[in-house]
Image (spheres, helix red, strand yellow):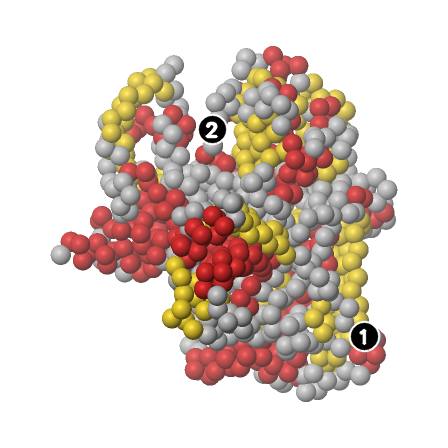
């Protein structure tokens, strides 16, 4: 393995000082002179016609500067699907009807928040309630309420994936299992809620500071919505208080603040309340999962058939991608010779279900890895062995979908075997469960129809050798700023503190699609590396002129020095070369440009992470309470850029995925979310967190910068499924719907013991 | 009607006229520009708004500003000595104990109150003291390590 100067070393966060001193500014913190406060009026009905909206009283309230409704925002329907306009189905403000409790109907701007709040109460909306439907299995029935005109059975997206011949595969199988699972919604629950501050200037140009993972999407979608030129809209992403997939799209705070600013000529800020964040932001896609799997007696998988009905909520949002990905990840990370997937996205009168960390994979892994364990038990095979027998390997081709290049899964399974052996016999009441997973390092899909490279970066070297790095990559806490600065420093041969980052501003940075699909390390990492290499090449030209080396020699840059690789003693100071290079270029700065767009990388992603996780639990038979004792993960993310950052991702992913497995849920009654606050919505807390251990897997991904792959979302995928398997291992009950609450465990235990008692009685 | 309020924040005296219904967090953020103190839930559930009131950790969204009258308030802005970070702040950086950073000021202030009271907490004691603080990014373990790391540093300094 190559020894690097910067990457691979535990490196603290480049935004650290700002974040521990309170200096880091979030949209939530921002204030501009003359700024107004905006609030959004939302539908109290899950499904209703809007007969009339009377804003006259609200407009007359002292301190109110503007009220907007669909009359102001127009008939435009928005969404990320610029290549598939029929999927852009979300009104800006609701025009004729509302489709979920929380659908935005009107917005006000006032001189303070109290007045804005009061004005909302003065807006009179006349609704005619319509029959509503909340369960996708009901919504697809004939005669169910129709949520969007012309969408038969409320199914507006279907996704199919198929290779081989599943019928043939099942015919040749010695054993077949069919199972059903129900996957719950989950709230992203970022600590900073959605928010935007919009300001029109006198030239009709709009600047929006906003809490987003995708500044470029917001720029384009706002321009469309406001009928403006794309580059008359400037979006700036300050520090963002968490996203997790929930801030990928255009939201009401962004377009309402913009319309209100346009109308008033003053800056307008809108921040979602915590309740709005729960009821009107997005959620993880709930799914009904049907799985059929066939295997030979020795555990070799021959066929898998999957059907998913997803509870999409009122609008498409990014769900159509999630529907594809869950089908893709249901065939992961094993070699299925025959596979068939059919997914259906169903409209319901609930808030839209969309992307959330793992995007379709946690659902697929919970169902799939539970079923693999059941299959192993049927066949009398060890859970680790069945996974080993079928694991993907390097260079494996998934027909018509993707080619796996690097794949550390076999290595991870071997090391996990050693770990399990070492762990030995468990204490009474404890169990251990496994789950395998893998994830994308960015998506190759371009439904946004961008004409730009997926990621672009610019490096500028100044006379003092300091480097300005411009990228639109969105650090929302995951640490991409640090990762990218490290990649830049490594490639240029300078120190991390020589790099100054300029990120998240659409006017200064060329395009990046944003922080989703764990794409920044591979895609923006490649763009940054290329930009740094471009700048370095210009320095090497000057170094060559000064040193006149044998032309077969190569230059190398390291530790602020440029030298001949074959003769390391012969070199120049980086600073001197920079000064000479700028003079030699008639005073021009050294500019390096880089970009990345995937080509010939199949349907999904240029590279995939892999891993296996073991979760050890203790189950209290009296209360049904599950305590997670230890989580051990063998994760292959290629060459690790920043070990500290990867561990941060691992720990955080466990917290989020354990919540998905054990306690996070969004129950509704007639479409109303019953726990829209951080008291009743249960997050994993300090004392719930288990001990964690990481097993290092050494791989190199040829498509990644320095061999790197993703480390953000993949880690969110295994925990809930491994938990289900661990609970079964501990107490012998199988729960097929998450979250696995104490109530469910107790009920299952009671049923199991009941059956056992009955059997005994009968025998007697 | 607005009322007079005298606050001492980070060692400086402030004279304010505010509506008595105002919460401490809103006065800190909106009247005084001390936006380091965050607000995540507005109902005392996340503790992102934690500040020190006479050395004790309190959720500033759960008390009125008037209740802080004539008492000493410390916010995250008052912890570092210019560019010199408090050992807790440095330890949070060293241990990657934050990601998005939104809950971090509250976490650090609560940890400060804990270590002021108990300079040698066990990991369990740290978890117990910090349990009300929500963080959606870190999974908490690295925060516990940061607090224990800072405790060690402070113990050495105390010797």
Residue at position x 75%, y 52% from top?
A: A345
From the viewer's perspective, tell me whether residue B100 is left or right of residue A182. Answer: left
Chain that bears disc 1: A
Residue identified by numbered label 2: A31
Query: Does A720 sit above or below residue A756?
Result: above
Chain that bears disc 2: A
The secondary element bearing badge 1 is classed as loop
Cβ atoms at labels 2 and 1 below 8 Å apart: no
Q: Which mark is residue A164?
A: 1
Residue A288 at x, y percent in the picture: 71, 59
Query: Does A112 sit above or below residue A701?
Result: above
Relative to the observer, which residue lies in front, A198 or A71? A198
Residue count near mark 1 (Cα–Cα under 10 Å), binned few <14, some 14–19, many ≥20: some
Relative to the observer, which residue lies in front, A250 or A457? A457
Q: Which residue, as the protein is rendered here, is positioned at the far bottom?
A: A298
Residue at position x 54%, y 29% from top?
A: A269
The disc, 2 or 1, on the residue closer to the chain's N-terminal end is 2
Q: In 3D space, how far apart are the residues under numbered discs 2 and 1 (Cα atoms)?
A: 59 Å
Relative to the observer, which residue lies in front, B133 or A91? A91
């Amino acid at each position: 393995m190559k020894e690097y100067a910067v990457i691979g070393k535990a490196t603290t966060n480049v935004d650290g000082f700002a974040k521990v001193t309170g200096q880091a500014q979030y949209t939530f913190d921002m204030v501009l002179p003359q700024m107004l406060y905006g609030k959004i009026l939302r539908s109290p009905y899950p499904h209703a016609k809007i007969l009339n909206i009377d804003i006259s009283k609200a407009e007359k309230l002292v301190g109110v500067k503007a009220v907007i409704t669909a009359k102001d925002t127009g008939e435009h329907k928005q969404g990320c699907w610029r290549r598939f306009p029929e999927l852009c189905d979300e009104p800006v403000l609701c025009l004729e009807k509302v489709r979920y409790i929380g659908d935005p109907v009107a917005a006000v701007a006032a001189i303070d928040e109290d007045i804005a709040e009061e004005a909302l109460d003065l807006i009179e909306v006349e609704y005619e309630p319509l029959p509503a439907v909340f369960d996708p299995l009901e919504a697809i029935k004939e005669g169910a309420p129709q949520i969007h005109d012309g969408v038969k059975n409320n199914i507006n997206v279907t996704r199919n994936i198929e290779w081989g011949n599943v019928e043939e595969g099942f015919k040749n199988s010695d054993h077949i299992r069919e199972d059903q699972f129900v996957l719950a919604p989950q709230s992203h629950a970022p600590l900073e809620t959605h928010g935007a501050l919009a300001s029109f200037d006198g030239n009709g140009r709009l600047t929006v500071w906003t809490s987003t993972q995708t500044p470029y999407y917001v720029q384009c979608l706002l321009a469309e919505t406001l009928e403006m030129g794309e580059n008359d809209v400037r979006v700036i992403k300050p520090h963002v208080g968490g996203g997790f997939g929930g801030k990928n799209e255009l939201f009401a705070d962004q377009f309402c603040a913009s319309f209100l600013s346009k109308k008033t000529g003053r800056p307008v800020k809108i921040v979602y309340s915590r309740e709005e964040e729960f009821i009107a932001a997005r959620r993880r896609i709930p799914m009904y999962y049907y799985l059929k799997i066939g295997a030979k007696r020795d555990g070799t998988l021959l066929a898998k058939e999957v059907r998913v009905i997803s509870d999409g909520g009122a609008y498409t949002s990014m769900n159509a991608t999630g529907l594809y990905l869950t089908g893709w990840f249901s065939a992961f990370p094993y070699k299925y010779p025959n596979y068939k997937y059919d997914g259906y996205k169903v409209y319901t009168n609930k808030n839209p279900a969309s992307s959330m960390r793992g995007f379709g994979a946690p659902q697929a892994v919970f169902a799939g890895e539970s079923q693999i364990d059941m299959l192993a038990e049927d066949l009398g095979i060890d859970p680790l062995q069945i996974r080993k027998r079928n694991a993907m390997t390097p260079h494996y081709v998934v027909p018509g979908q993707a080619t796996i290049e690097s794949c550390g899964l076999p290595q991870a399974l071997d090391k996990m075997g050693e770990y399990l052996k070492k762990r030995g016999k468990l204490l009474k009441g404890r169990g251990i469960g496994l789950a395998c997973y893998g994830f994308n390092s960015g998506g190759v899909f371009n439904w946004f129809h961008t004409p730009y490279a997926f990621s672009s970066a610019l490096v500028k070297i100044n006379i003092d050798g300091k480097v300005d790095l411009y990228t639109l990559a969105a650090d929302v806490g995951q640490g991409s700023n640090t990762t990218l600065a490290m990649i830049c420093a490594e490639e240029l041969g300078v120190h991390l503190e020589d790099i100054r980052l300029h990120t998240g501003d659409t006017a200064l940075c060329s395009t990046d699609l944003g922080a989703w699909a764990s794409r920044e390390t591979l895609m923006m990492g490649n763009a940054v590396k290329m930009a740094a290499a471009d700048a370095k090449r210009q320095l090497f030209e000057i170094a060559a002129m000064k040193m006149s080396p044998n032309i077969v020699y190569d230059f190398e840059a390291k530790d602020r020095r440029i030298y001949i690789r074959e003769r390391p003693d012969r070199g120049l100071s980086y600073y001197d070369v920079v000064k000479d290079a700028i003079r030699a270029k008639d005073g021009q700065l050294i500019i390096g440009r880089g970009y990345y767009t995937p080509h010939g990388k199949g349907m999904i992603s240029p590279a995939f992470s892999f891993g296996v996780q073991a979760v050890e639990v203790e189950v209290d038979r009296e209360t049904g309470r599950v305590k997670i004792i230890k989580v051990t993960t063998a994760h292959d993310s290629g060459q690790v850029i920043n070990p500290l950052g990867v561990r941060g991702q691992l720990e955080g992913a466990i917290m989020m995925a354990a919540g998905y497995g054990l306690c996070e849920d969004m129950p509704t009654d007639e479409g109303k979310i019953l726990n829209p606050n951080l008291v009743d919505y249960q997050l994993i807390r300090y004392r719930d967190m288990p001990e964690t251990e990481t097993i290092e897997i050494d791989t190199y991904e040829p498509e990644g910068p320095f061999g790197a792959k993703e480390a953000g979302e993949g880690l969110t995928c295994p925990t809930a499924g491994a938990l289900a398997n661990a609970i079964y291992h501990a107490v012998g009950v199988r729960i097929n719907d998450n979250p696995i609450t104490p109530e469910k465990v107790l009920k299952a235990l009671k049923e199991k013991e009941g059956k056992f008692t009955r059997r005994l009685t009968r025998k007697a | 009607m607005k009322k007079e309020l005298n606050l001492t924040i980070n060692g400086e005296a402030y004279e304010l006229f505010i509506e008595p219904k105002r919460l401490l967090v809103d006065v800190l953020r909106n009247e005084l520009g001390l936006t380091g103190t965050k607000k995540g839930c507005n109902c005392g559930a996340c503790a992102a708004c934690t500040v020190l009131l006479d050395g004790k950790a309190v959720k500033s969204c759960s008390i009125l500003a008037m209740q802080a009258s004539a008492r000493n308030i410390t916010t995250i802005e008052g912890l570092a000595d210019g560019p010199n970070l408090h050992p807790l702040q440095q330890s949070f950086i060293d241990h990657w104990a934050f990601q998005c950073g939104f809950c971090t000021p509250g976490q650090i202030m609560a940890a400060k109150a804990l270590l002021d009271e108990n300079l040698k907490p066990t990991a369990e004691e740290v978890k117990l003291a910090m349990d009300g603080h929500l963080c959606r990014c870190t999974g908490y373990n690295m925060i516990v390590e940061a607090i224990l790391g800072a405790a060690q540093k402070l113990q050495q300094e105390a010797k």
